[in-house]
Image: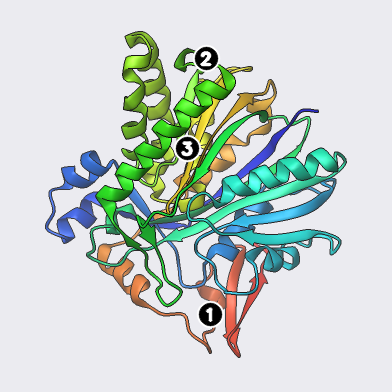
Amino acid sequence: MDIGIDKIGFYTPKKYIDVVELAKARNVDPDKFTIGIGQSKQAVPMQYQDSVTMAAEAADQIISDDDNIGLVIVGTESSVDESKAAAAFLVDLLNLPKNIRAFEIKEACYGATAGLKMAEGYVALHPDKKALVIASDIARYGINTPGEVTQGAGSVAMMVSQNPRILKFDHEEVYMTKNVGDFWRPTFSKTAFARGKFSNQVYVEFFSELWKKYQTDFNQTVDNFDTMLFHIPYTKMGMKALKTLKDETDPDKFAELSKHYQASIKMSREVGNLYTGSLYLGLISYLINGDPKSGEKMLMFSYGSGAVGELYSITVQPEFKKILDSEKIKKVLNNREKISISDYENIFVKDVKNGYKTNDSDVFDKFYLREIKESERLYKKIKL
């Protein structure tokens, strides 16, 4: 049975800042941000937005009445509740049936990949059912911190089914887990803590070790892949791993892989860090901005600090161009408003506490946090 991704949706907030303006405000050479880090714009979520509302926005784009969804998984490290899963809120917001499994997965940026693997197993056992897997996150490090330029926000929703029309899972995968202190966010903190250089080092080490195992387990080389996609919290990150393969193939092949990588980072440059969704935004970007072919084999490197890593392969399906709504996804990026650095700072520091209420006239999205009453988050869906 062929199982894979049948539909993909993407959402990012309607406000953003220019990274050059951010650099100037922080008295930093803009080249450090635009070239050294590789970012151009950064999404700015509003107060009424969180991992739940963004997940709903992305999922709403791909759900249809004839989808027989039996499983909903949200991968996030921006959880809004220590007990209730984001997926439980979505069952209500998206009008999903009650006879459904819905839960949340947390393992830093690896969560969505874990969700896809669970979804694959679920569909294998229930071929008449579909699974909705959503990566939804707000990356926060704080104003005027070293990680500020790698912030971002957004969500990627993927429908997993048999006979997928976009991407097929190849059932080739290797994975590993190590207890590593490269990145963490304690329950008391709304911003993350990170050892940046160490995290980069661990990222590359995970890729190298997993690649060796992948080669051994499946008798594969670099030349077996048309494209390699990476977790990209900032767009220069994946290239660090890709460069480790330069001596394993000829210059023309490496140039081809590098060209495909550049196509995969175009959208991330415009959005920033999506944490669990970063790898999958790169996938969307490549499908839209690259020149993928039916039957093309791609290697996916998923990494979540803490740390869990996985390499797995997928194959592009014949109908992918017809099914992937490229124009709708492009509109999500193009129909945004640039705001000033001072406006971004004002939004960032506002706290959403018990008693918070949203003024409906300030909402520009379909799903939003209406209020927090008795410490319970209450959401609303509106017709736009």
Disc 1 and disc 2: Cα gap in Å?
A: 54 Å
Q: Quick check: can you spot residue 40? A: no
337 up-or-down from 264: above or below: below
> Would you identify the image quadrant in which residue 146 lies?
bottom left
Q: Secondary structure at mark 3?
A: helix
Viewport quadrant of the C terminus: bottom right
The residue at which mark 1 appears reads as 359
Classify mark 2: helix, strand or loop: helix
Q: Which residue is mark 2?
A: 224
Left or right: 28 with respect to 266?
A: left
Say which residue label 3 marks. 282
**Amino acid under label 2?**
Asn
- Residue 179, percent across and down? 43, 54
Left or right: 321 in relation to 290:
right
Identify which amino acid the numbered label 1 is placed on.
Answer: Asn
Query: Could you give the CA–CA distance between mark 3 and mark 2, rounded to whole angstroms?
Result: 20 Å
Pinpoint residue 183: horizontal percent, then vertical percent.
37, 58
Crowding near the residue tagged with mark 1, few <14, some 14–19, many ≥20 C-alpha atoms within 10 Å: few
Task: Classify 201 as above or below 311.
Answer: below
Neighbours of disc 2 within 10 Å: few (<14), some (14-19), many (20+): few
